[in-house]
Amino acid sequence: MQPTPDFDPAKLAKSLLRRSRQGALATLMAGSGDPYCSLVNLASHPDGSPILLISRLAVHTRNILADSRISLMLDERVAGDPLEGARIMLSGRAEQAGTDKELLQRRYLNAHPSAEGFVSFKDFSFFRIRPTGTHLVAGFGRIVDLKPEQFLTDLTGAEDLLAAEQGAVEHMNADHRDAMNLYATRLLGAAEGDWRCTGCDPEGLDMQMEQTALRLDFPERVTDGTALRKMLVRLAGEARKKMDQGATL
């Protein structure tokens, strides 16, 4: 099926990747090759690819070490009939962390702080899923296959931003929780709450309250810390303007 004119499949796929905190992971059973499915927690790399923290004692980890091919189902978890919500089936390979372990660990712990208690266990390892494609289903007439370059974020030239990311996350959470709440309520229509920043990349900011995650897209691409600060100040101003307009109605 072809998408309708008002439908942006790449944008929706990116949003699902950034907002998903759990997914159904399918692997191939070592030896038999039979399909095996399990529930996993996940976070996202700055480019949007999923990050897993899994134990070697788990069947799915042993499967991945024998054959890295996987698929991952993510959905919006909407109220009512779950088939009415958008979902993606991501295919790819699970790659164990190497020199990027520090990046994967901090991104994962920002999304799942409770994992701090067992992240150092010797049987646990970080894996990054390298996508080969995704199948998006978002309702009647909205079924699309996408290539990685259509739903992953291009990090070219954003080295300065990635280096500044964790400092920015900590600064926002320590000193600007009011701005985080304004982004969530005034720009994204979410309920008020204790929203915190979990990450940023050239295309947007990720926020979370407990297990509910939001994605704030930037109107323009940012690639360094200075541009990020200016963008966050600009968006805070837009959010306050919306709040003031609402107060006068």
Image (spheres, grey):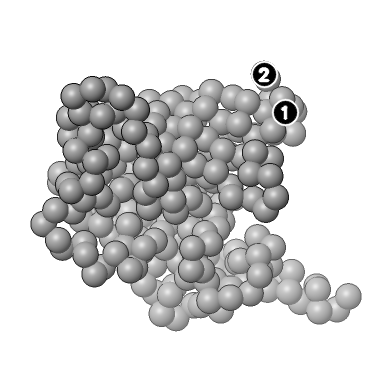
- In the rendered image, the quadrant that contains the N terminus is top right
Where in the figure is residue 69, as x and y percent of width and height? 29, 27
Q: Residue at x 27, y 40 (%)?
A: 60
- Determine which residue is flagged by label 1: 140
Q: In the image, what residue type sits under mark 2?
A: Met
Which corner quadrant of the image does residue 36 belong to?
A: top left
Q: Which mark is residue 1?
A: 2
Answer with left or right where residue 154 lies relative to residue 232. Answer: left
Where in the figure is residue 29, as x and y percent of width and height? 26, 29
Q: Residue furthest right?
A: 249
Where in the figure is residue 157, as x and y percent of width and height? 34, 43
Answer with left or right where residue 244 lies relative to residue 190. Answer: right
Q: Is residue 213 above or below residue 39?
A: below
Please state which of residues 136 and 8 is positioned toward the viewer in this rendering. Answer: 136
Q: In the image, what residue type sits under mark 1?
A: Phe
Q: Is residue 79 above or below residue 109?
A: above
Q: Helix, strand, or loop for circle 2?
A: loop
Q: Disc 1 or 2, which lies upstream in sequence?
A: 2
Answer with left or right where residue 246 lies relative to residue 37. Answer: right
Q: Residue at x 34, y 68 (%)?
A: 113
Badge 1 crowding class, 10 Å Cα cut-off, few under 14, some 14 to 19, many 20 or more, is: few
Q: Residue at x 56, y 79 (%)?
A: 178
Where in the figure is residue 111, as x and y percent of width and height? 39, 61
Number of marks in picture: 2
Please state which of residues 53 and 48 is positioned toward the viewer in this rendering. Answer: 53
Q: Is residue 150 visible?
A: yes
Residues marked 1 and 2 touching at CB (< 8 Å): yes
